[in-house]
Image (spheres, rainbow, N blue to C red):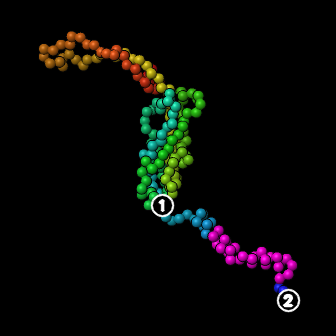
Amino acid sequence: MNRFSGWTASLKRVIFRDAGRKAMALLLAVILYGSVTYKSKDLYSRVIPGVNVDLVLPPDVVNAQGSVLNVQLKVSGAERVLSRLSPESFDCKIEPVTGNAPLDQPRVVELTPDHFRKPFGVTIEGITPAQISLQLDRVITRNLPIRQVFDSEDRLPAGYVISGVAVRPGEVAVTGPARVVQ
């Protein structure tokens, strides 16, 4: 007598046909799931200070603060990868100006790990400071006259006098942020 009949025979064919392949596929699926979800004990953290944040600005706009923007990154990854990292291993470019937005107010830019290009196998866990404040201004050029100023005639050696001074050119063009040049 046949032990399997009716719907149980169909179930037997589904389960036991290519049982070896199905078992292999199930084992690989479990291994893949474990490797993706299991956090390795080999992950280490490190703080990288002095990572530059480059501003991508139009030619007629400048950062009026004039300082280099640096942040500190907390990163994690394999120890051998972290040991080779330096601030130059990371690249951050942000575009704080879009369209014709007014420049008279400070802009706050929220930095996220997505702003940074990082080496393979490294995860950015934190950014300090997470926000940077920018004071942007238009670049202008202004001609300024040159004024002659002398420290003192008393410092001249004995027997010398200043008889005439000529400065050429009489003015100089100064280019910079509008707030400073005005």
Q: Is residue 135 above or below residue 112?
A: above
Which residue does the numbered mark 1 point to in the structure image?
A: 78
Q: Position of residue 5 (x, y in %)?
A: 85, 81
Whether residue 108 is visible, yes or no, is no
Residues tagged 1 and 2 counted as in contact (Cβ below 8 A): no
Magenta stretch: give its range.
Answer: 4-30
Q: Position of residue 153 (x, y in %)?
A: 20, 16
**For residue 83, what is the image quadrant?**
bottom left
Tag 1 secondary structure: strand
Mark 1 or mark 2, whichever is nearer to me: 2
Q: Is residue 125 above or below residue 53?
A: below
Q: Which mark is residue 1?
A: 2
Q: Main secondary structure of the magenta part?
A: helix
Of residue 23 and residue 92, the one placed in the foreground of this image is: 23
Residue extending furthest toward the top: 163
Q: Position of residue 44 (x, y in %)?
A: 47, 60
Crowd rating for badge 1 (residues with CA inside 10 Å; few <14, some 14–19, many 20+)? some
Whether residue 134 is visible, yes or no, is yes
